[in-house]
């Protein structure tokens, strides 16, 4: 495991709900961490893997998504240049894959309000790619590297069992985690993944459309965090 940016580094916005940060188009439920680094800072593949996609438009700006094993993906947004990889290309652990960007209104900045690297980790759970907090994920990877053990993410899998649901047809989907006893909004990407999983009938992908009564009850219990 290698950190996506050479440590030490500072994290601006962390993972999770952050509300309106005053940057047009920026997410309110943050799906990754924002590492505060200047334009041109090298960005590394944390683990070996393959390139899933490279994008050049949208909120992410210039971005790359890597897949490291059957259940782990990482994403890097607001890059300085379009990464020169084809989908399916192999990357080595620690390989420099890009340079960070994010300067407001730069060609690959997307919705970024200032230089930083947006780094995200996704785990496949019940057919859905779910964003997880990259900080403990990186810490676990560093600890495993120190003990020269292979990084085994299986435990994490069990820790976040849950199900997806929506409160009515027009509202976004939420993920309810049994372990955390809390819900969070699914990202657009996760919803797309979920819908395709639904269509392909992946076993065990249970999608519950939960009645308003349940929603009200969760609010009362204080476990619902839209
Ligand atoms: Zn971000």
Image (tube, helix red, strand yellow):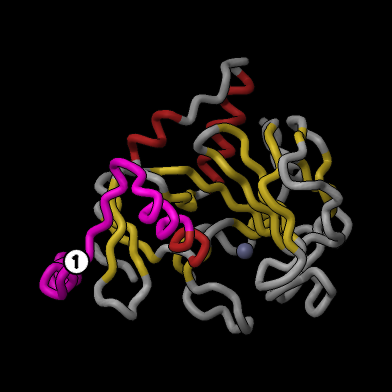
Was residue 211 drawn as part of the magenta stretch in this picture? yes
- Residue 225 visible from this viewpoint: yes
**Quarter of the image with the C terminus in it:** bottom left
Image position of 225 (left or right of 211): right
Residue lying at the far top of the rendered structure: 148
Question: Image height check: is 30 above or below 90?
Answer: below
Q: SS at mark 1?
A: loop
Circle 1 crowding by C-alpha within 10 Å: few under 14, some 14–19, many from 20: few
Residue at the image point whose x is 70% and y is 60% from the top: 77
Image position of 214 (left or right of 94): left
Q: Position of residue 97 (x, y in %)?
A: 81, 45
Foreground residue, 169 or 164?
A: 169
Residue lying at the far front of the rendered structure: 200
Residue at the image point whose x is 49% and y is 67% from the top: 188
Split into quadrants, the picture shows ligand 1 in the one at: bottom right
Q: Position of residue 83 (x, y in %)?
A: 83, 53
* Residue that badge 1 annotates: 210
- Residue span colored magenta: 193-221
Q: Position of residue 94 (x, y in %)?
A: 77, 33
**Quarter of the image with the N terminus in it:** top right
Question: Image height check: is 127 above or below 33?
Answer: above
Foreground residue, 57 or 216?
A: 57
- Residue 116 visible from this viewpoint: no
Q: Main secondary structure of the magenta part?
A: helix
């Amino acid at each position: 495991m290698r950190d996506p940016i050479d440590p030490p580094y500072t994290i601006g916005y962390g993972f999770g709900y952050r509300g309106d940060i005053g940057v047009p188009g920026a997410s309110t439920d943050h799906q990754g961490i924002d590492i505060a680094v200047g334009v041109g800072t090298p960005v590394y593949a944390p683990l070996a893997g393959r390139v899933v996609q490279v994008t050049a438009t949208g909120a992410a700006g210039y971005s790359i998504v890597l897949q490291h094993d059957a259940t782990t993906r990482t994403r890097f947004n607001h890059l300085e240049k379009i990464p020169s990889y084809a989908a399916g290309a192999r990357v080595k652990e620690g390989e420099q894959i890009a340079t960070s960007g994010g300067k407001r209104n730069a060609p690959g900045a997307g919705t970024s309000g200032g230089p930083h690297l947006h780094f995200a980790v996704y785990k496949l759970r019940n057919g859905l790619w779910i964003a997880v907090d990259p900080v403990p994920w990186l810490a676990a990877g560093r600890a495993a590297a120190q003990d020269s053990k292979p990084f085994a993410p299986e435990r994490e899998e069990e820790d976040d069992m849950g199900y997806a649901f929506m409160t009515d047809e027009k509202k976004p989907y939420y993920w309810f985690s049994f372990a955390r006893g809390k819900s969070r909004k699914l990202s657009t990407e996760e919803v797309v993944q979920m819908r395709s999983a639904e269509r392909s009938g992946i076993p065990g992908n249970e999608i519950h459309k939960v009645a308003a009564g349940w929603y009200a009850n969760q609010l009362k219990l204080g476990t619902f965090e839209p």
